[in-house]
Image (cartoon, rainbow, N blue to C red):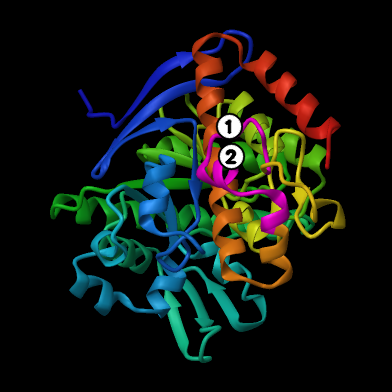
Amino acid sequence: MKESFFTLRHSDPSCKARTGAMVLPHGAVSTPVFMPVGTNGTVKALTSDDLAEIGFEIILSNTYHLYLRPGTEVIAAAGGLHPFMNWKGNILTDSGGFQVFSLAPIRKIREDGVEFRSHIDGSYHRLSPEKAVEIQTIIGSDIQMQLDVCTPWDIPYRKAAEALRITGLWLDRGKKAWERARDNGYGGKFFAIMQGNFFKDLREKSAEALVASDAPGFAIGGLSVGEPEAVFLEYLACAAALLPPEKPRYVMGIGTPQYILNAIEQGIDMFDCVLPTRIGRNGHVFSRRGPVSLKKAENRLDFRPVDEDCSCKVCREYSRAYLRHLFKTQEILCSMLASYHNLYFLNDLVKTARRAIEEDAFLAFKGSFLAGYTGGRE
């Protein structure tokens, strides 16, 4: 019997929401799970101790950025990314496909891989499916992603089909490279990525390839790339329904409460986004009554916490007035406190969602939360 690292714990009978657990080299991860993004081996404005204190069991980092700086030589000499950044939990790494996609003017995609110029110094590099696996193995990723071809949402069918064809070739080659690394003692898992843009027949074709690959886990790529929310929701439901229930499902790049809860409803187990720390650095924080802009004058004499129902240390110890003062004076502490609160807020949201699923009450929880969140903006 094939060993499985993912266990399905409970499914809510009223929808597709489910809870589960992944057993990875650096400990168990309860799902659904939100993963903070630490692109360069750090979640901006937070320490590894902060992340552990909040309760995160897995974070995300990026192959492309770490490959360019500090480089695999440094990471290998440090014994991997975990000791290098002093993080004892799990790490998922994006293969770098999305970052290369964003370098459209300075990259060329071929069947054998992608050639690109560094955004740092303009130097030329080549990333193949095998090299992406090699870099992520050196990093020591607990979950590594295949190299794929990302596409914008409004491209013609023929371009989406060609991107999917190359992604399929890269999946086969990447999985074989991962299997060789696994046979040599590497313990991380390999996830295949669904593409197909916004064409349902291409999504179906991609799902068939993923299932045939028998990769340990599956990710849904190519969503939340600028499409309208209604289109996102339609294709989220479509893509999730095409994947088998016995393996974890990961939607890449979503981080608002609305998108997270919609993903959970469709049976998605994992998600990540830079949003909570990015908006925190720009003076925006989550609350159960909707997003709060700290810079507004109304916060000048407001000595309430950001969220009176939040138990994080920021809400326990600091006021909106103080956070506004920090933002206005451009103090670094504002970014630290706002980012901490935002990540705590999303982690708590997902933990509460897990409890609601276990109680067969997810849809009621989702409806109640969103009614307060979208109806009470501050």
Judge left or right: residue 173 versus residue 294.
left
> Label 1 neighbourhood size at 10 Å, few (<14), some (14-19), many (20+)?
some
The kind of secondary structure element at disc 1 is helix
> Foreground residue, 130 or 66?
66
Counting from the top left corner in percent of width and height, residue 298 is at 86, 51
Name which residue lies at 76% across and 44% down: 291
Is residue 84 in the magenta section? no
Is residue 322 in the magenta section? yes
Magenta region: 306-323
> Label 2 neighbourhood size at 10 Å, few (<14), some (14-19), many (20+)?
many
Counting from the top left corner in percent of width and height, residue 29 is at 36, 35
Name which residue lies at 53% across and 33% down: 348
- The residue tagged 1 is 349
Q: Is residue 72 above or below residue 279?
A: below
The amino acid on which the numbered mark 1 sits, given as a three-letter code, is: Leu
Q: In this view, does 145 lie above or below 328?
A: above
Counting from the top left corner in percent of width and height, residue 19 is at 46, 22
The kind of secondary structure element at disc 2 is helix
The amino acid on which the numbered mark 2 sits, given as a three-letter code, is: Phe
Name which residue lies at 59% across and 31% down: 240
> Foreground residue, 103 or 157?
103
